Amino acid sequence: MQPYAKKEAIKRINRLAATGQPFIFIIDYEQKQTYVEKTDNVDDNLCRYDFNGKANTAKQNGHTNEEFTWQPEVPPLNEYLAAFNIVNKHIQTGNSYLTNLTWQVPVTTDLNMKTIFHRAQARYKLWLKDRFVCFSPEPFVHIRNGRIHSFPMKGTIDASLPDAEGQLIRNEKEAAEHATIVDLIRNDLSMVAEQVQVKRYRYCERLETNKGAILQTSSEICGTLPQDHIKRIGDILFRLLPAGSVTGAPKPRTCTIITEAERYQRGFYTGVMGWCDGQTLESAVMIRFIEQENGRLYYKAGGGITSRSHAEEEYHELIQKIYVPIYRDYQD
């Protein structure tokens, strides 16, 4: 597949959507590289995807009773603290209300990326040969019948804890972080849609992982698109990027803080991926992401930092998110 610069990517997405030709798109975090390819032309030896059932590969048995090695090389706490303190300083001085701080973590595993793609139980999955694999639980936007929906996901807890859902819902830091993101996404959707409203607020979803179950909170925000939106799908997508749930608020200033605090290039991690045929669009934020670099695998993960954040708690949340959704007793 050929990567396109932003301007050409927007034109290509608009053209394919307007003519009703099904296609996939993969947009990196900085919107410098975008793959846009008609589904008929996608070579499954190089790219495999399953976007909430829109797929170019058959679902395979996960063989999830097999053991596998999974060993992250988590960063020392003092290194994480250095990045956290940069973010916290900006928050305390009012430059940001919420900043999503992420990390690149080396992982040792006997699973290859294609195997992870097929065995992972996730709503949105993507594998690019010798590049990366993503198994995301978080939708970006859905478009159906002239309506646009977004589902920001913020707030995580170990599901095995006593009254885990209650703890998560009552947590003031998590509640404030979620409220900030919902307000940001509502404002973002208002740039492309009318009658924007929060349809569901802060509901819990359970995710199974190789390290046990976790709970995460999401909200649903929706609005009505202009009648000519089919001809402007590319413009709409890029108007909303980068995704608010993986940047923060206010978005432009927070993105510069992220560049200052993080020690690596995100690349396609925290970009968006999806499928569209003009009438319907399915897309996801590219979190839960493993990339191959120089023969090594790196897991990219992170979380939101607010004025209520405690560094050690955020550090442990980062570690908790370094998982694969491959678990025992799954029935295919």
Image (cartoon, rainbow, N blue to C red):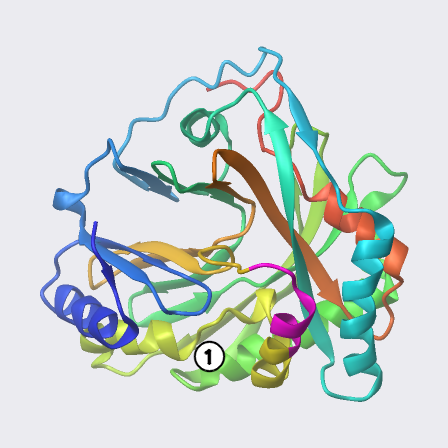
Q: Position of residue 172 (x, y in %)?
A: 86, 67
Q: Is residue 261 magenta?
A: yes
Q: Position of residue 44 (x, y in %)?
A: 23, 34
- Report the residue that reaches farthest toward the top: 66
Does residue 46 appear to the left or right of 214 in the view shown? left
- Which kind of residue does numbered mark 1 sit on? Leu
Q: Residue sitting at 24 percent across and 69 percent down?
A: 9
Local secondary structure at mark 1: helix
- Report the residue that reaches farthest toward the left: 19
Local packing at callout 1 (Cα closer than 10 Å; few below 14, some 14-19, many 20+) is many
Q: Is residue 154 magenta?
A: no
Please name whichever residue, 208 or 163, is drawn nearer the observer in this view of the structure. Answer: 208
Please name whichever residue, 332 or 42, is drawn nearer the observer in this view of the structure. Answer: 42
Per the picture, the main secondary structure of the magenta-coloured stretch is helix
Is 164 located above or below residue 217 in the figure? above
- Please indicate, yes or no, whether residue 136 appears anywhere in the rendered image: yes
- Report the residue that reaches farthest toward the front: 294
- Please indicate, yes or no, whether residue 53 appears anywhere in the rendered image: no
Number of dots carrying numbers: 1
Q: Residue sitting at 20 percent across and 73 percent down?
A: 8
Q: Splitting the image into 4 quarters, where does residue 303 fall?
A: bottom right
Q: Position of residue 135 (x, y in %)?
A: 49, 41
Q: Splitting the image into 4 quarters, where does residue 235 fall?
A: bottom left
Does residue 24 appear to the left or right of 259 in the view shown? left
Q: Which residue is mark 1?
A: 189
Residue span colored magenta = 257-264
Q: Residue sitting at 66 percent across and 77 percent down?
A: 257
Q: Residue sitting at 77 percent across and 81 percent down?
A: 90
Q: Position of residue 117 (x, y in %)?
A: 43, 32
Q: Splitting the image into 4 quarters, where does residue 94 fall?
A: bottom right
